[in-house]
Image: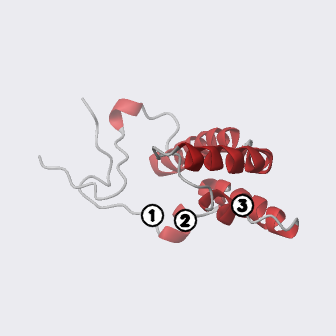
Amino acid sequence: MPSFGDDHGREFSISSATWHDAAYHNSARHVSLRLKREALDRDVNVDSMATALPTSKTAQVALYLDHARVCLAAFPVLFEHYKDERPLRWKNYCREQKALHSICMRVKGNKRAKKEDVVVAYGDGRFGS
């Protein structure tokens, strides 16, 4: 049975400034933007190159061969740009989970409290009785 402290019934919230502090800083977006800036510095516009690829959904052989030719020409540049995206997403996910755990531990307060005795809800945490 959970035991309630002296804050039972009170609402507790964290300001957005605290939520977005160094503990929950999302670095993947910054790294992605840095990679795009570096590509632009090398005179390679990756976005326009990717959107300029002709579609492969065609019944005409000539159009499909044009698609294959353009894709093969663009592949080395696009692969070089996007090859680090998957490990970056995984690293970002791990950091987000670690930061969320850190925030929950700050809200929890007492490190000796059992996890069954503490409820941490974020968002619109309104629960009926």
Q: Does dot 1 land on a helix, a strand or a loop?
A: loop
Q: What whole-number distance in Å separates the C-alpha atoms at marks 3 and 1?
A: 39 Å
Q: What whole-number distance in Å separates the C-alpha atoms at marks 3 and 2?
A: 35 Å
Which scheme is used to colour this image of the protein?
secondary structure
Name the one closer to the observer, 28 or 98. 28
In the picture, measured across the screen, residue 100 lies left or right of residue 53, that is left
Residue 64: where, in percent of width, then height?
57, 45
Q: Is residue 36 above or below residue 116?
A: below
Q: Reading the chain from its start, which is encountered first: label 3 or label 1?
A: 1
Q: Does dot 2 land on a helix, a strand or a loop?
A: helix
Q: Does dot 3 land on a helix, a strand or a loop?
A: helix
Residue receiving disc 2: 18
Classify mark 3: residues with Cα within 10 Å, few (<14), some (14-19) or many (20+).
Answer: some
| Nearest-to-viewer mark from 3 and 2 | 3
Residue receiving disc 3: 46
Residue receiving disc 1: 14
Residue 47, disc? none
Q: Reading the chain from its start, which is encountered first: label 3 or label 2?
A: 2
